[in-house]
Amino acid sequence: MILHFIHKHFIWIIVSAYIVAAIFPELGLLMRHSELGSVDILRTKISVSLPPAMLAFLLFNAGLGIRANELTDLKRKPSLLVAGAAGNLLVPLAFIVCVNVTMKLWQEPEEVQQILTGLALVASMPIAGASTAWAQNANGNLTLSLGLILLTTLASPILTPLVLHAGGFITTGHYSEDLHELASSGADLFLGVWVILPSLLGMLTHRILGERRSAAISPYLKLSNFIVLALLNYSNASLTLPGVIAQPDLDFVIVMLIIVILLCAVMFGAGYFLARLLRAGRAEMASMMFGLGMNNNGAGLVMASLAFSNHPSVMLPIIFYNLIQHFMAALVDKMLSVTDATD
């Protein structure tokens, strides 16, 4: 009962977390600067702080919910899986190029670079685990949803640096330099340690525990996920939103919001058109739309907060997209329900 209530109203919990971060950021900043120690991986010393540790916890739980036998059906029709992963990579890059051309008319070049850099970080992230929940609600193909998440996550140490380098070529100045530096020296290690490793450990744990015991602890993991995700969003937003409230730049926020809404709509639309192009069924179309429309912005926010702490406005497009993708998913879910009712 509690889980159903939280799930139904979770978007408003995230909105509330952002509001609290804007007004009372102190705890969030304390969480961000909390050092938990360090570990040595492949002769590299990695500092462990609370935000990436929370991200790893979420990805471990996501991996724990994946059943390997559910993915075997993808061998029969891999075209949708490949098309979805390609669309998740190429469509946002094309959108960013269009924004770069259009925004040359904007009066503040610095703001343009902040928007482009934030969009590049959004585009570089793998598909979000939350897309499976939306696909399940819409009677989508869960095997395809899980396959898209797993493929884009496992490929992220290769694909994410490519997108960040592409973003570096589109942007200019220190934003371009920071994106190239992140792509060359930090993104693959970050994703390997904090995204892929906990995901694989979660899948291994699921295999060790078995279906019955994994199902038994699932409700508790879901509840912990909600709590940790809300805290993670709060801590990341505490770095950016207080400055937005203290020194509001309304035209900048409005144009950024419009651009992010357009990107989200384009990504959901790309999922729809790819499914239609490949003559997929209604269930596969739903999974493609939610998969392409929803990115793992938790990882994007953590990575941005670590790499662009001197430019907190870069995080705003990621924060906006994180909210808008859920509102857009709710709209798509409603549209699919109406379509089903009229068929």
Image (tube, rainbow, N blue to C red):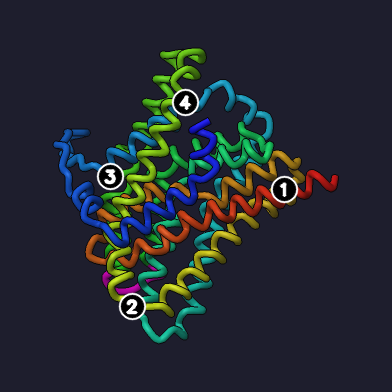
Q: Crowding at label 4, few (<14), some or many (≥20) Cα neighbours within 10 Å?
A: few
Instruction: Kindly check if marks 4 and 3 are in contact, taking CB atoms under 8 A apart as contact.
Output: no
Q: Secondary structure at mark 4?
A: helix
Numbered tag placed on residue 284 in the rendering: none
Circles 3, 1 touching at the beta carbon (< 8 Å): no
- Along the polypeptide, which appears first: circle 1 or circle 2? 2
Q: CA distance from mark 3 to mark 1?
A: 35 Å
How many labels sit on residues?
Answer: 4
Mark 3 → mark 2, Cα distance in angstroms: 28 Å
Q: State the quadrant of the C terminus.
A: top right
Instruction: Identify residue for label 4.
Output: 219
Nearer to us of marks 3 and 2 is 3
Q: Amino acid at mark 2?
A: Glu
Answer with left or right where residue 81 lies relative to residue 279.
Answer: left
Residue depth check, mark 1 versus mark 4: number of the one nearer the observer: 4
The x, y position of residue 146, in whole percent, is 55, 34
* Mark 1 to mark 2 CA distance (whole Å): 40 Å
Q: Are marks 1 and 4 in contact (CB under 8 Å)?
A: no
Q: In the shown orientation, is residue 173 left or right of residue 297? A: left
Badge number at residue 336: 1
Residue bounds of the magenta highlight = 169-174
Q: Look at the image and say whether residue 61 sits in the magenta stretch.
A: no
The mark that comes first in sequence, 4 or 3, is 3
Q: Nearer the viewer, mark 4 or mark 2?
A: 4
Q: In the rendered structure, which amino acid carries the disc numbered 4?
A: Pro
Q: Amino acid at mark 3?
A: Pro
Question: Considering depth in this image, is 26 or 42 the residue closer to the camera?
Answer: 26
Tell which circle, 1 or 4, labels the residue nearer the N-terminal end: 4
Lower position in the chain sequence, tag 3 or tag 1: 3
SS label for mark 3: helix
